[in-house]
Amino acid sequence: MKMQSRLEEEEQAKAALMGRIQRLTKLILVSTKNTLPSTPIVDKSIHRRRHSFGEEEVRIHFPANF
């Protein structure tokens, strides 16, 4: 029972950390967008692999971050 509880706590902490990373990334993108000259940026998200550590779980727990 303790292991299950510990796993759940770790998953929640991981999801919270992913949310913080998402918000900071957005903040960095907005701040650099305002300081850099306007040049086209290639969208590399098409080539990005999905994270193997529970991105779907993060989407479920923190849908506002996506």
Image: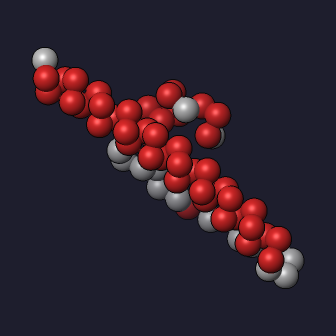
Direction from residue 53 to residue 65 in the image, left or right: right
Q: Who's the residue at 75% across and 62% down the image?
A: 30
Residue 35 horizontal/vertical position (percent) = 80, 77
Residues 7 and 59: in front is 7
User: How many numbered badges does the structure rendering display?
Assistant: 0
Direction from residue 26 to residue 39 in the image, left or right: right
Q: Is residue 40 visible?
A: no
Q: Is 35 drawn above or below residue 19 in the view shown?
A: below
Q: Quadrant of the N terminus?
A: top left
Q: Is residue 50 visible?
A: yes
Residues 48 and 21: in front is 21
Q: Who's the residue at 13% across and 23% down the image?
A: 2
Q: Residue furthest right?
A: 38
Residue 51 horizontal/vertical position (percent) = 42, 49
Residue 38 horizontal/vertical position (percent) = 86, 77
Q: Is 51 drawn above or below residue 45 in the view shown?
A: above
Q: Is 23 drawn above or below residue 57 in the view shown?
A: below
Q: Who's the residue at 30% across and 31% down the image?
A: 9
Q: Quadrant of residue 44?
A: bottom right
Q: Residue furthest top?
A: 1
Q: Quadrant of residue 26?
A: bottom right
Q: Who's the residue at 55% across and 61% down the image?
A: 47
Q: Is 22 drawn above or below residue 66 in the view shown?
A: below
Q: Quadrant of the C terminus?
A: top right
Q: Residue furthest bottom?
A: 37
